[in-house]
């Protein structure tokens, strides 16, 4: 396999890295996180207009770059390295992925708004009792005249407090929760429905981001709110896009892991004990070597998952779950050793490393735990 980036991909990586270095340093990020909004609309505008990365995966017909999995990997690794809190994953990867696959005039209109930086999309799929199970959907959608009526709740919807649009899953037919048949996706304009059946209760998360509990109480939507074909959303939209999201999350984790290891390596070169840098002690040299190996294994697993996203569902799923399993293990190992090497200062808010550790801990369980992905890998390998 060829792991070299094309010239265009290298330019994308360099331009994003340069922009984040100049505009998204640790102190600038702290100011963004401490602001009332919790994110920067200025940075979001820069992503759209200076870099054009919000449309990196969007079709050229709506002004995008028509990129694929490798471009998503590039974006998310850079986002992980800079600890970007703006909703790149939620909008530019998951939102664009769902809308692009669904197609239609309304989807195209929102895609164009994403490219222009005027739309933020969040995907509400997980439910209070779902525990990351993709088929555990109890939210219902019933036809009502020319439209739909939705009832149900979505839990921990990342970026929902900032979203202009929500994409939510609901059962339009089929059996009970757990049945892949009968799942559909719906597009909701938040401003138009916030006081008429839609409730979005936002809150900050431990990794400086924001999520929300979304409740729909007989929410009335127009007919064109349906995305894709009624009842066929799981295989056509949800399953492939969520695998793409997990692969992109692994890429973000790689950016976090590189920083955890790099900052720890810098620290042991500077911190002195008994008149010598502690990096000269053999036990810490072994620890840093083990951390480096864990990072490189995570990189390899992420590359493999990214390159397998275009394969049949079972092969794609095995590669993605193997990557999430291995990357999550690496996040715990590297994160814990980074903090332990720094000592008490490693968990203080003033040190950047503690923020990377918190994000590493969140990614470890985001989009499925180690145990869930191990079980999925075993089931797909049978």
Image (tube, helix red, strand yellow):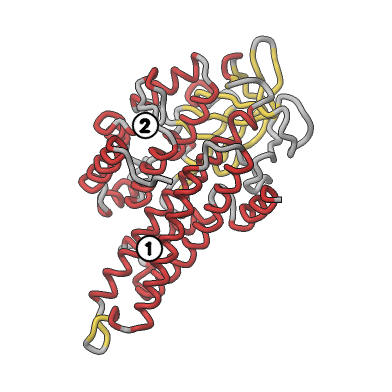
Q: Which mark is residue 272?
A: none
Q: Residue furthest bottom?
A: 274
Quarter of the image for residue 93 reads top left
Query: 139 and 12: which one is in front?
Result: 12
The residue under the point 65% across, 10% down is 146
Quarter of the image for residue 214 reads top right
Residue 118 pos. (x, y %): 36, 25
Q: Is 24 left, or right, of 209 in this rendering?
A: left
The residue under the point 56% across, 53% down is 322
Query: 82 and 32: which one is in front?
Result: 82
Total numbered labels placed on residues in the image: 2
Q: Note whether 50 is above or below 308 in the view shown.
A: above
Quarter of the image for residue 223 reads top right
- Residue highlighted by disc 1: 354
Q: Note whether 77 is above or below 325 in the view shown.
A: above
Q: Earlier in the sequence, mark 1 or mark 2?
A: 2
The residue under the point 67% across, 50% down is 381
Query: 163 and 231: which one is in front?
Result: 231
The residue under the point 60% across, 48% down is 318
- Residue highlighted by disc 2: 56
Query: 291 and 35: which one is in front?
Result: 291
Spatial CA span between label 1 and label 2? 31 Å
What element does badge 1 sit on?
A: helix
Residue 68 pos. (x, y %): 43, 34
Residue 88 pos. (x, y %): 40, 39
Q: Note whether 50 is above or below 285 in the view shown.
A: above
Q: Is 247 left, or right, of 114 in this rendering?
A: right
């Amino acid at each position: 396999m060829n792991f070299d980036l094309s010239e265009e991909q290298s330019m994308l990586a360099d331009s994003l890295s340069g922009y984040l270095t100049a505009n998204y340093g640790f102190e600038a990020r702290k100011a963004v996180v401490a602001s009332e909004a919790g994110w920067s609309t200025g940075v979001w505008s820069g992503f759209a207009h200076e870099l054009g990365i919000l449309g990196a995966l969007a079709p050229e017909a709506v002004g995008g770059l028509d990129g694929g999995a490798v471009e998503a990997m590039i974006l998310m690794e850079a986002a992980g390295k800079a600890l970007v809190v703006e909703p790149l994953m939620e909008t530019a990867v998951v939102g664009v992925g769902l809308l692009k696959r669904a197609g239609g005039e309304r989807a195209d209109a929102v895609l164009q708004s994403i490219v222009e930086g005027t739309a933020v999309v969040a995907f509400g799929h997980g439910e209070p009792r779902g525990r990351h199970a993709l088929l555990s959907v109890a939210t219902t959608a019933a036809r009502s005249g020319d439209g739909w009526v939705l009832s149900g709740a979505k839990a921990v919807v990342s970026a929902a407090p900032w979203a202009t649009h929500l994409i939510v899953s609901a059962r339009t037919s089929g059996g009970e929760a757990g049945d892949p048949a009968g799942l559909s996706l719906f597009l909701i304009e938040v401003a138009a429905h916030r006081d008429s059946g839609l409730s979005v209760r936002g809150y900050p998360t431990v990794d400086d981001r924001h999520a929300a509990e979304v409740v729909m109480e007989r929410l009335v939507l127009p007919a064109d709110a349906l995305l894709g074909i009624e009842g066929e959303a799981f295989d056509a939209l949800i399953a492939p896009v969520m695998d793409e999201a997990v692969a992109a999350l692994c890429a973000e984790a790689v950016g976090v892991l590189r920083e955890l290891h790099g900052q720890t390596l810098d620290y042991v070169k500077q911190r002195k004990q008994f008149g010598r840098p502690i990096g000269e002690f053999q036990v810490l040299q072994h620890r840093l070597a083990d951390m480096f190996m864990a990072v490189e294994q995570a990189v390899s697993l992420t590359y493999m998952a990214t390159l397998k996203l275009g394969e049949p569902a079972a092969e794609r799923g095995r590669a993605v779950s193997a990557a999430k399993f291995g990357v999550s293990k690496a996040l715990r190992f590297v994160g814990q050793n980074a903090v332990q090497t720094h000592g008490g200062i490693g968990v203080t808010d003033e040190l950047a490393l503690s923020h990377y550790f918190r994000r590493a801990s969140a990614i470890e369980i985001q989009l499925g735990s180690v145990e869930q992905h191990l079980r999925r890998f075993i089931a797909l390998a049978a």
